[in-house]
Amino acid sequence: MNVSGLEEGMDRETVTTALLSNPLMRSLGAAVIPLLVEEYLGDETDPAEIRNRFLDLCGDFVFVMPALKTAKYHRDSGYPVYFYELRRRPSLFKDIKPDYVKADHGDELFFVIGGPFLPDDTLFSGLTEEEEKVLSKNMMKYWANFARTGDPNGPGLAEWPRYDQDEGYLQIDVHPKQKAAQRLKDTKYEFWNKILPEKIQKMAQEAAEHAGGEDGRPLVGTRYGKLLGKMVTVKETDRQVHAFYGVPFAKPPVGPLRFAASGPPESWNGVKEATEQPPM
């Protein structure tokens, strides 16, 4: 997401514009954007803090929430999962990235591959602090242990909890800031995976009632005529969606049309019931 002027901060309008201009965010639907702005910005008015919260929003949507959901899926399948959050930004980015950019996506690679020990003319090499060399050694041990045994823990390393029902994870940082924690961004996870879908569903139901027939069933117009559908519940969820059955997409391929190219369906007057599967 390319947003200019971040150094000076942002306001609610620029945040909304930035979200609407991004195809990935826009795929959620324009009506959802105000819900995201309200959740992350609240009543905040400070431009710098608004910018920081905007960056949190983007990071949560693109990286954190999908990673957490994937970790939960693997955990629930019985696989050993070890989750981490990198909290140390490599010091080599000191003069490259502005201060408000914290540990970024992929920054852990600098430590995992031993970046602090590489020659100066090598990719990922650069200015490092002594404590980062210790961090890099520890991270290489964690990764090697996990590759060998499926468990990153080992002698001399801070305990890395398994990601189980307590949702423990490791906050990776220089000593003594590195520590185990639990339930990374649990309130935001609930927002993205429970509260937001419920709000979207409510908006969809209200739109259906507004645009539907007298009984609230969804009514849509097509180029061939109007279709009346029904609300159905998605299996194993409480979510409801609009359903339309037996929608004519082409003329039936019978008689002289059996081997001919398909043609458009016949138009109809009034409203066509699309609430049941037609006979096969």
Image: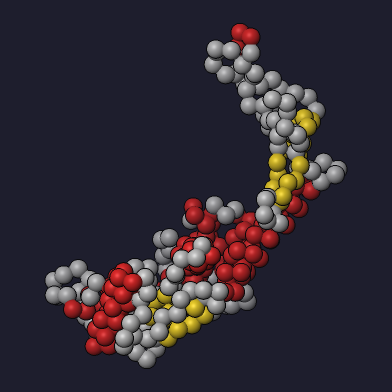
> To which quarter of the image does residue 195 belong?
bottom right
Residue 229 drawn at (x, y percent): 75, 38
What residue lies at 63% left-to-right and 9% top-to-bottom?
255
Q: Is residue 52 visible?
A: no
Side (left or right) of 230 relative to 72 = right
Residue 53 drawn at (x, y percent): 51, 73
| Image label count | 0
Give 138 or 118, whichever is nearer the viewer. Answer: 138
Give 214 or 13, whichever is nearer the viewer. Answer: 214
Q: Quadrant of the N terminus?
A: bottom left
What residue lies at 55% left-to-right and 12% top-to-bottom?
259
> To which quarter of the image does residue 192 belong?
bottom right
Give 11 or 170, whichever is nearer the viewer. Answer: 170
Relative vertical location of residue 173 with respect to residue 53 in this rendering, above or below: below
**What colour scheme has been applied to the protein in the rendered image?**
secondary structure
Q: Quadrant of the C terminus?
A: top right
Q: Is residue 56 visible?
A: yes
Give 96 or 140, whichever is nearer the viewer. Answer: 140
Side (left or right) of 208 relative to 130 = right
Outermost residue, right side:
214
Relative vertical location of residue 174 with respect to residue 198 in this rendering, above or below: below
Residue 128 drawn at (x, y percent): 23, 82
Residue 263 drawn at (x, y percent): 59, 18
Outermost residue, top side:
256
What residue lies at 68% left-to-right and 50% top-to-bottom?
234
Side (left or right) of 126 relative to 17 = left
Relative vertical location of residue 278 with respect to residue 17 in this rendering, above or below: above
> To which quarter of the image does residue 183 belong?
bottom right
